[in-house]
Amino acid sequence: MRNYAKQNEVRNGFVPQVRRDVAAKLKRLETASCPFANLPEKKRTQWALTKEEMKNCVWLQAEVVAQVEFTEWTPDGHLRHLKFVGLREEGGGRRSART
């Protein structure tokens, strides 16, 4: 398993039809274990995901990549003001890079 890092949640761009389409594609990828190496987060910020909040998460195998637009990186390494653009199939998942 790769050591993926959680960046942030995306809400903008998820109109009802897009949510239904994405849910149908992701249902087959559900898994019981968290794939993120940086969770739960040690420092509490508005973007952090705590151990308690993780109990409500549905985890997925890393087989698709969500394409998002964002305005900037926060000082804590999260993305700010995200907008969902789409999903793309990836063989094993390609990491995003901070440039």
Image (spheres, rainbow, N blue to C red):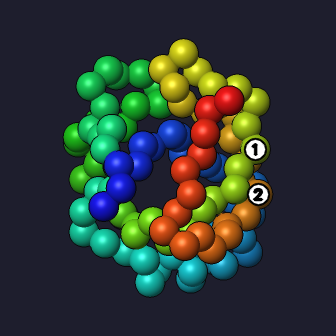
Residue 19: horizontal and vertical position, in percent? 64, 69
| Mark carried by residue 90 | none
Q: What's the residue type where badge 1 is placed? A: Glu
Location of the N terminus (image quadrant): bottom left
**Residue 47 against residue 66 in the figure, above or below:** above
Rendered residue at 54%/15% (across/down): 75
Q: What's the residue type where badge 2 is placed? A: Val
Q: Is residue 33 visible?
A: yes
The residues tagged by marks 2 and 1 sit, at their Cα atoms, a distance apart of: 7 Å
In contact (CB < 8 Å): disc 2 and disc 1: yes
Q: Is residue 57 visible?
A: no
Q: Residues within 10 Å of mark 2 (few under 14, many from 20)?
A: some
**Residue 14 against residue 50 in the figure, above or below:** below
Location of the C terminus (image quadrant): top right
User: In this rendering, would 47 be left or right of 19?
Assistant: left
Q: Write down the quadrant of residue 86 in the picture.
A: bottom right
User: In this rendering, would 65 be left or right of 31?
Assistant: right
* Residue that protrudes farthest toward the top in the picture: 75
Residue 29: horizontal and vertical position, in percent? 43, 77
Q: Residues within 10 Å of mark 1 (few under 14, many from 20)?
A: some
User: In this rendering, would 41 be left or right of 90?
Assistant: left
Residue 17: horizontal and vertical position, in percent? 73, 75
| Mark carried by residue 69 | 1
Rendered residue at 25%/53% (across/down): 55
* Residue pointed to by mark 2: 85
Lower sequence index among marks 2 and 1: 1
Residue 69: horizontal and vertical position, in percent? 76, 44
